[in-house]
Amino acid sequence: LGAYDIGCRFQSTIRASRLGDAFERQKCCMCVDAFHSYAHNYLCQMKNHPNRIVGVGLEDFGTIEHFFSASNTIAPVIRYASSYCRHVFLDLFFKQWDEDKYLNLGTMIYNNYKQALDIVSMESIALDEAKQSLGIQEGDLQTWCQEDIEYFAHLGKETEWDVHAMAYVELLLKLRDAESQAQSASTRFLSTTPKDYQFISFTGTQSYSGDMVATRKLETQRRYSTECLATIQQEVTSMEVKMGIANRWQPSSPEYQATLKYMSNHQYQCALDNLQCLVVQQLFELQRLNISQTGASYKMRTQISKSLQTQCHATQNAIKTYNTAAAALSPPRPQLDWSKVSHYSFLEEFNLLRDTRQDVCEKMWAKPAIRAVIRQWLRIDYAKEEIDRCNMEIRHLHTVIIDEDTLFTQCLASLAAEQAIEHVAVYEYCSHCPLINMQVLHHISKVHLLPGFSVSYPVFWTRTYHTYHFWIS
């Protein structure tokens, strides 16, 4: 399992490349790390968020983000350094980073294990009380989660009939406007005709050019309006033949009214999409304002602040567009203002406003109390998965330490027997590694003492800590 900020699309790219066969054969898959997943739509999060993948546990896949954040500390040091010194400092930083992370492996596993046990022990009681008070039966939460996924999977998809009906009604609206404009242009042109008009044969004394100047503009408008009307009439007729419509839809027709209502809903959803995109972008820009300890951070914060000022105007315009589209619905949707939108969590609130074909508020999984219980239930499941992952990691880490100790012992014995010159350097390295492993095993032994720890280990594993202590001393 790999995490990438665009892992949802990058997975398709891998499968289409030369690596696709090996990718499928090894049953690999991609997801989106927790930091970047909140910029994706809600349906993508439900499929590709780490906490939505079975077996991941509480992992957020934010190692790279943490690494980049930590590397900012050396930016003031190497900013004006030469290329050689910059590479030396970076190499030292990478080596120290690896050593620190290995030293803290035991601490990390202990903290993750303790966090997962706390979640299971504390939130399980609250979950049972919430299920009892809301009358939730076993299996309801799983069913509602599946309904939630299916709802958003089909949300916003237009059928072919909807698209063709929208195009037909749009043409009818254009036809009505064209008829009105053609009638108006014809009326203005005919109004220039005298009431007592009589045909007079040309005698050479009339000024034809003067009359032409007075009527040329009106005649051009009338001809242009007539040509537009004829073009639209031809398009409408062709679409009616293609769609099998015998009688042209009128504003009072049920099909016309239903399609017009659908078009209003479509405009509402498009306005909501644009508004959600702007709010998500602005919230992520605000997070970037916390960057510090770099020489360019002040300039970056200044540029971001200017960008946010401009973006606020765009968001306000998007809110106005949304309010206009919301007011056109039947019944009208609630109006929004900036103070309300800025407090949205942009994970659920925007999506729950979308449905205009059925009342989503009547669905059980859409109720705030039920959604809170679902989140709590999922978090407990993630914690249980994290405990299983920690049990596996403890076994792996413990085994590696034992194998490494065996390898060091054999290597030192071989070099001592050969009286090799490398024996001193290898002995120094082998003396340093057990000190680090001692620290790791110390925290692993603390994991064994946790109340919820129930994994059994072979006897010789339980003696490893004391063996290391005796060997070092």
Image: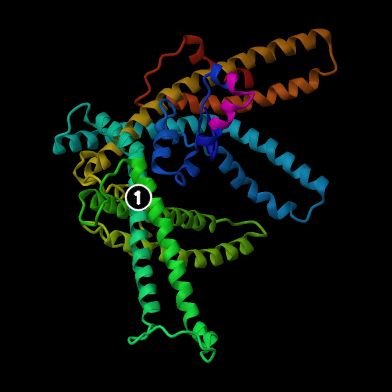
Could you say which is closer to the camera, residue 416 or residue 281? 281
Instruction: Tell me: residue 138, above or below residue 344.
Output: above
Q: Classify residue 425 by image quadrant.
A: top right
Residue type indicated by callout 1? Tyr
Residue 314 percent across, percent down from the top left: 46, 64
On the question of residue 465 being in view, the answer is no
Against 276, is 451 above or below?
above
Looking at the image, residue 102 lies above or below residue 456: below
What's the residue at 21%, 30% (across, down)?
140
Q: How is the image coloured?
A: rainbow
Q: Image quadrant of residue 268?
A: bottom left
In the picture, measured across the screen, residue 36 lies left or right of residue 409, that is: left
> Circle 1 sits in a helix, a strand or a loop, which is it?
helix
Magenta highlight on residue 16: yes
Q: Please state if 469 lies on the left or on the right of 121 as rendered.
A: right
Residue 358, percent from left and from top: 23, 44
In front of the other: 89 or 303 = 303
Is 310 magenta? The answer is: no
Q: Closer to the camera, 377 or 238?
A: 238
Residue 49: percent from the left, percent from the top? 44, 36
Q: Quadrant of the C terminus?
A: top right
Residue 33 position in % (x across, y down): 50, 38
Give the residue drawn at x 21%, y 52%: 253
Residue 72 in view, yes or no:
yes
Prevailing secondary structure of the magenta residues = helix
Q: Which residues are magenta?
A: 11-22
Residue drawn where x is 69% and y is 52% of the image:
75
Local packing at callout 1 (Cα closer than 10 Å; few below 14, some 14-19, many 20+) is many
Note whether 367 is above or below 195 in the view shown: above
Residue annotated with mark 1: 168
Residue in the foreground of this view, choosing between 40 and 77: 40
